[in-house]
Image: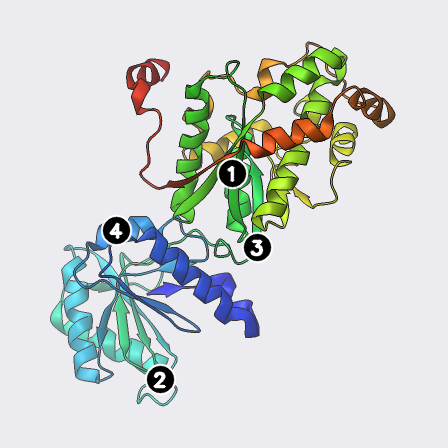
């Protein structure tokens, strides 16, 4: 039994959210085709049909849109059957010396007992079956939940916390500017939590960046797939653009103009792919390109909304989230990405837009953008994919 939490506030649109959640669960459980999903207005039910429950539980934990869920026993709405199921369920969990309580809810108001009566009578049935068990209203060892719904009664003794948030895809699509660093995977995670479907855009500059650096970015994407099932990964060739910028632009403006090219390309990809926003891992004041002045100069190339989920976080807060979603150890592997290979020693923290525009006149912006756009490579990345295994020993040495 899956409980929706925030989705229950969506009124007439709730059906769309439930359909998206069901789609995401089906994608996450694609290795378990026997599981049947039944989405209803206030609950969703997964019939396992023999599939391994513990594996299913672990795959449900990261799916956004699930507030809590429970393995449940379903019985007919007959009191004797409810009493018997309750006693057997508590007995299966009981260890001598433990306490319990009954927490009953009644969606079917026509049922013969109200919630107080259910708590009393079901509790009595458990005590009759296990006379030595203690009743404890606050913080019991076992909490037996009994839900009387219109179709059946559902009983459970475990409530597992879900990921919360909104189902990925229910808030539209955004293009995540994914580097190989700590911040952008966290930004992608936070965007997905608010229902945004992400596609990862990665800028690749061989021979200055290695294939291992590219594979590292793909591995970071793999870490984000459990929340949705699969993510489109888009590799953008960026070498020619960076060489042209390095040759024609003063050192202090290299990063600003580089980021403007990235923003232009990401926006073109967004348009091609039907996205509604650009997402990145910028944190205010963290580096020279992430001051308000720099962001203003960089944003000038687009009118598309740019979502910065970690904008107000400090580095330690971002690291805590990176560790939570298991991207930190990968992110700190020392493979260079294209944002660092040409990083100037003294970048402008307050770039002037008029100078930026003047320096860009030295570049054939449209042709450079078009060639990079034409060279894009698309790849679907799924949970369980591996990309660094070809250099496994090197990878382990770095860890």
- Residue 288 visible in the picture: no
Q: Which residue is mark 1?
A: 200
In this rendering, would 305 be left or right of 362? left
Name the residue that disc number 2 marks.
114
Which label number is shown at residue 31?
4
Sort mark 3 into few (<14), some (14-19) or many (20+) by Cα contacts within 10 Å.
Answer: some
Picture quarter containing residue 312?
top right
Binning the other alpha carbons within 10 Å of mark 1 as few (below 14), some (14 to 19) or many (20 upward) gives: many
The N terminus: image quadrant:
bottom left
Q: Find out whether the residues at labels 2 and 3 contact each other: C-beta distance under 8 Å.
A: no
Based on the displayed image, in which of its 4 quarters is residue 108 positioned? bottom left
- Please tell me the numbered disc located at residue 40: none
> Circles 1 and 3: CB distance less than 8 Å?
no
**Dot placed on the residue nearer the N-terminal end, 2 or 3:** 2
Secondary structure under tag 4 reads loop
> In the rendered image, which quarter contains the C terminus?
top left
- Residue 172 numbered mark, or none: 3
Which quadrant of the figure has residue 267? top right
* Mark 1 → mark 3, Cα distance in angstroms: 15 Å
Name the residue furthest right.
Answer: 354
Q: CA distance from mark 1 to mark 4?
A: 24 Å
With 242 as the anchor, is 32 left or right in this view? Answer: left
Image point 34% across, 79% down: which residue? Answer: 149
Distance Cα–Cα, label 4 vs label 3 = 26 Å
Above or below residue 361? Residue 190 is: below
The spot of residue 378 in percent (x, y) is 47, 38
Residue 20 vs 292, above or below: the answer is below
């Amino acid at each position: 039994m899956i409980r929706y939490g925030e989705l229950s506030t969506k009124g007439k649109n709730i059906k769309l959210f439930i359909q998206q959640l069901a789609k995401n669960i089906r994608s996450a459980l694609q290795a378990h085709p026997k599981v049947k999903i039944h989405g209803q207005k206030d609950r969703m039910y997964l019939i396992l049909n023999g599939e391994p429950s513990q594996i299913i539980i672990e795959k449900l934990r990261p799916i956004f849109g699930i507030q809590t869920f429970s393995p449940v026993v379903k019985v007919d709405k007959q009191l004797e059957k409810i009493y018997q199921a309750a006693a057997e369920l508590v007995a299966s969990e009981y260890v001598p010396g433990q306490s319990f309580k009954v927490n009953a809810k009644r969606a079917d108001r026509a049922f013969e007992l109200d919630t107080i009566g259910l708590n009393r009578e079901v509790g009595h049935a458990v005590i009759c079956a296990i006379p030595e068990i203690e009743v404890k209203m606050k913080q019991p060892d076992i909490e037996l939940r009994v839900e009387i719904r219109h179709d059946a009664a559902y009983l459970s003794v475990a409530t597992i916390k879900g990921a919360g948030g909104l189902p990925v895809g229910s808030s539209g699509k955004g293009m995540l500017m994914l580097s190989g660093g700590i911040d952008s995977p966290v930004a992608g995670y936070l965007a997905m939590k608010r229902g945004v479907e992400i596609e990862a855009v990665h800028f690749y500059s061989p021979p200055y960046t290695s294939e291992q650096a590219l594979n590292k970015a793909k591995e970071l994407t793999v870490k984000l797939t459990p929340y949705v099932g699969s993510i489109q990964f888009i590799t953008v060739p960026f070498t020619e653009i960076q060489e042209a910028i390095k040759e024609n632009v003063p050192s202090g403006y290299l990063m600003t103009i580089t980021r403007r090219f990235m923003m232009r390309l990401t926006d073109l990809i967004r348009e091609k792919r039907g996205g509604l926003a650009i997402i990145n891992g910028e944190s205010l004041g963290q580096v020279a390109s992430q001051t308000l002045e720099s962001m203003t100069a960089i944003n000038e190339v687009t009118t598309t909304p740019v979502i910065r989920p970690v904008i107000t976080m400090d580095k330690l807060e971002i690291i805590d989230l990176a560790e939570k979603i298991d991207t930190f150890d990968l992110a700190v592997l020392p493979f260079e990405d294209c944002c660092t290979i040409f990083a100037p020693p003294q970048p402008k923290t307050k770039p002037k837009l008029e100078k930026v525009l003047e320096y860009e006149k030295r570049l054939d912006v449209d042709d450079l953008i078009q060639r990079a756009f034409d060279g894009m490579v698309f790849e679907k990345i799924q949970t369980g994919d591996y990309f660094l295994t070809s250099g496994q020993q090197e990878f382990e040495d770095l860890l």
